[in-house]
Amino acid sequence: MTDHFYRDTWVEVNLDAIGYNIKQMKEKLPKSSNIIAVVKADGYGHGSVPVAKRALEAGAKALAVALLEEALVLREAGIDAPILVLGRTSPEAAPVASDHDITLTFFQEEWLQEVNTYKLEKNLKLHMKWDTGMGRIGIRTEEELKNILDALNKNPSIYLTGVFTHFATADEEDLTYFYKQKARFGALWAFFKENWPHDASIHIGNSAASIRLPEEMHDYIRFGISMYGLYPSGAVKAKRQIDLKQAFSLHSRLISVKKIAPGESVSYGATYTAEKSEWIGTIPIGYGDGWIRKLQGISVLVDGKRMPIVGRICMDQTMIQLDTEYPIGTKVTLIGAQDSDVIEMDEIANYVDTINYEIPCIINKRVPRIYTPNK
């Protein structure tokens, strides 16, 4: 979070939108299901600490990150809610996790065996990952599960508090593979209950699964991309089973406005040449900020009107074709609403042939974040 900045480019994160999206999801879930707010990758580029705090205020019961380092950032910010690290953490870091009451993900018998060689001053909480068809990390067979449960019984300082899986196609129109994964999870769960007498919470639902099939979720859901007001896919967005508000917007200001003559070119490689006299504005953002060169040609908003990016995007600056002369300092919106028009994250993602998840993540920390409302 930036207290003060000097450049004329910034991101606004609407924390009320985060709270609104959490509450919309809570209304869809049965009372027996709670929300884990996923704030990995610095809150998908929105800022993990402010987002986490707002999500907890809005009713989320726990947080999830990808790395132990990300969890420690939250603890250092004074957040004492349960935190789960979704990725694999090196065994030698287990004492750090236990000291800070951070829950780790595991799925390997040898991982447990190595953890057992370290002295734990406090109990270590673990969630076990099952690979039901995603093909990334997690146990796949009953034999693996049985060996891991046997290893768990050998260390009284380690507590298994949850099990989970992740769906590969919950955001697609065809849910055949989703239900195949769900059946695999059910079979492993039945074996687990026969061989493990202790309680463990279950979370299988990502944003897509939770929005589409809230009644089929368990103790928790993992609310990630949709907490930020973005739909996981076009298929999910088209059904509008939940109302979401985009929290992220990106803005800049004109720092130069000039009139060029017919035949004059703009930016590296002279890829754009004016056919008539026209006004060109420059804004201080470029691929060094994550506003990548592939965005050449897309429109931004000036005075509520769409103006195209012309010429190659530079490391620190981008040029736009204006419909008239505008004062230096005029606000330019690259993502978000201005007057009656809006540039959605999906529009940017579609233009560069990626998913909306990627766009806020690649707008890097050179671009300061402003949080509204500023409490």
Image: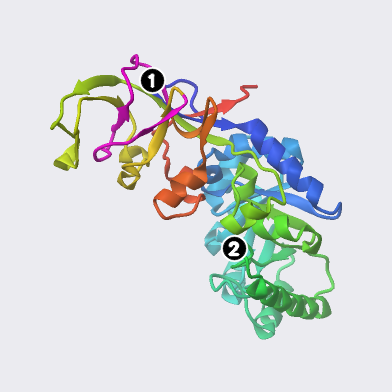
Residue at x 63% of width, y 75% of height: 177
Foreground: 285 or 38?
285
Q: In which quadrant is the C terminus drawn? A: top right
Outermost residue to the front:
276
In the drawing, does residue 60 fall left or right of residue 256?
right
Q: Where's residue 39, x and y in %?
A: 59, 46
Q: Secondary structure under badge 2? A: loop
Query: In this picture, is 4 found above or below 202?
Result: above
Question: Is residue 365 covered in magenta?
Answer: no
**Mark 1 residue type:** Tyr
Residue at x 72% of width, y 39% of height: 56
Foreground: 161 or 347?
347
Q: Quadrant of residue 265?
A: top left
Which residue, given by chain and number where applicable, does mark 2 sit on? 118
Question: Is residue 312 covered in magenta?
Answer: yes
Q: Give the Cα separation between the discs numbered 2 and 1.
A: 48 Å
Q: Which residues are magenta?
A: 304-332
Q: Is residue 252 visible?
A: yes
Residue at x 57% of width, y 55% of height: 234
Q: Which mark is residue 6?
A: 1
Residue at x 34% of width, y 32% of height: 285
Q: Secondary structure under badge 1? A: loop
How many C-alpha atoms fall within 10 Å of the one at disc 2: few (<14), some, or many (≥20)? few
In the drawing, does residue 350 fall left or right of residue 308?
right
How many C-alpha atoms fall within 10 Å of the one at disc 1: few (<14), some, or many (≥20)? few
**Mark 2 residue type:** Tyr
Q: Where's residue 224, x and y in %?
A: 62, 50
First in sequence, mark 2 or 1: give its number: 1
Query: In this picture, is 123 found above or below 175?
Result: above
Q: Which mark is residue 165?
A: none
Outermost residue to the right:
31
In the drawing, does residue 345 fall left or right of residue 228?
left
